[in-house]
Image (spheres, grey):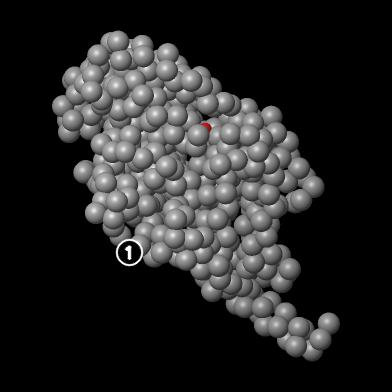
Amino acid sequence: MSRRTIAALAAAAATAIAAGGGVSQAQAQDVKIGLILPYTGPGAVLSPEMDKAIDLYQKLNAAQIKPYKFTIIKRDSKLPNGAAAKVDAQELVTQEKVDVLAGWIYSPDAIASAPVVNAAKRLAVIMNAGTSFITNLSPYFVRTSFTLWQSSYVMGDQAAKYMHAKTAVVAYTDYPPGKDALAGFKTAFEKAGGKVIDAIPAGGPEATPDFTPFFQRAKDEHPDVLFVFVPAGDQATAVVKTYNALGMRAAGTKLIGTGDIVPDDLLQGMGEAAVGLITVHHYNADLDNPQNKAFVAAWKKAYGPDSTPNFTSVGAWDGMAAINHAVHATHGKIDDGAAAVKSLEGWKFNSPQGPIEIDPQTRDIIMNEYLDEVVKGSDGKLHEKVLVTVHNVKDQCKMLGIGPCAQKK
Ligand code: PHB
């Protein structure tokens, strides 16, 4: 070891001790993050959007991360059925000895990982999975993404109040977040005077189904709106295509949904068929705030002018900011899961999506929801125009204490 290295190590150790850490320099410096994402299967189109955000966060925030260093250890969760994700979590904890777990695009993967998270007693940051009750399965889960109850509840309310819809048909991917989307939408829509006249399970998350029979059934029922939730990715493009091919707009039924059906990275590829779609989400790449302007500009500089971050990117970005907060707040002892979680309860951050906070009661995210319309801009490109902003939305499933959301661990 050179004299310069020894001096640098001593200085870093002194900084850690001065910061109240008292941990060894090696512990303080290197934070191992085990990242569970689907690099194969239907989620393979989504995980690069999160990986890019994780890389960009580290590049743009190097000074804020110091004196720590993040090492990301990736594992493929494969098909969205939880089997591989659970093994991933076990390996990351027992073999790689990670300090923190993170990732999870699909809810079944986070649900299956919960017992491992509980046994490991490590902070586990959910960067996408949106089924409400997941955070009740372990006190170590903190969610920086969203819940379907947040977007769907606001969409149900706005469909009645802003769009003046009286009747709706719901089509949803038949797995936990889809069931939440149905419940959230129906609860708010019917409370505001609307009626859900049919609810159609439309395939699972493993493969993109042919939506034609499901949407034809909806068309025949002549609702004012067809509310759809599918996991973002190829399924979203297929939804917009099928709605258009069946001529449902001309037949008087508007397509509405959670923002999962119009992810920003796929929007331009959807073409004219997407113009006029109304959705509710916590993020779109056109949001007009200083954090988002800087985020999108840095993204385009790093990944090319035609590359656009989507809501999964922002869940990962905010997740990295949360981990960075926790590592500093615990003076490097982020492997103390209880202390790491405690440091995040009530944590506030200026995200590209707007101001966010981790709800100290539920460890879910509190954030704005935006009612958006897809419009064609003067640049010839498709954009999201914000029609209504609903501030500081909490997970409504837990607020209302519905079903599995009623039990808190
Ligand atoms: C989920 O499985 O929780 C999930 C996946 C993709 C989405 C939203 C939710 O777009």
Q: Which quadrant holds the N terminus? A: bottom right
Residue in view at x 35 percent, y 62 percent: 293
Residue reaching furthest bottom? Answer: 3
How packed is label 1: few (under 14 Cα within 10 Å), some, or many (20 or more)? few
- Element assignment for label 1: helix
Q: Nearer the viewer, residue 104 or 297?
A: 297
Examine the image and state in which quarter residue 305 appears. bottom left
Q: Looking at the picture, does residue 280 appear above or below residue 384?
A: above
Residue reaching furthest right? Answer: 1
370 relative position to 106: left or right: left
Residue in view at x 79 percent, y 89 percent: 3
Residue in view at x 23 percent, y 19 percent: 251
390 relative position to 142: left or right: left
Task: Locate residue 357, reporting x and y percent.
Answer: 39, 51
Can the viewer see residue 372 in this picture?
no
Task: Locate residue 155, reporting x and y percent.
Answer: 29, 32
Task: Locate residue 276, reporting x and y percent.
Answer: 25, 36
> At label 1, which amino acid type do we have?
Pro
Q: Looking at the picture, does residue 4 appear above or below residue 86?
A: below
Residue in view at x 55 percent, y 67 percent: 59
Q: Nearer the viewer, residue 344 or 255?
A: 255
Q: What residue is shown with label 1? A: 290
On whether ligand 1 comes within 8 Å of the CB at mark 1, the answer is: no
336 relative position to 313: left or right: right
Examine the image and state in which quarter residue 160 appears. top left
Can the viewer see residue 306 in this picture?
yes
Q: Nearer the viewer, residue 338 or 206?
A: 206
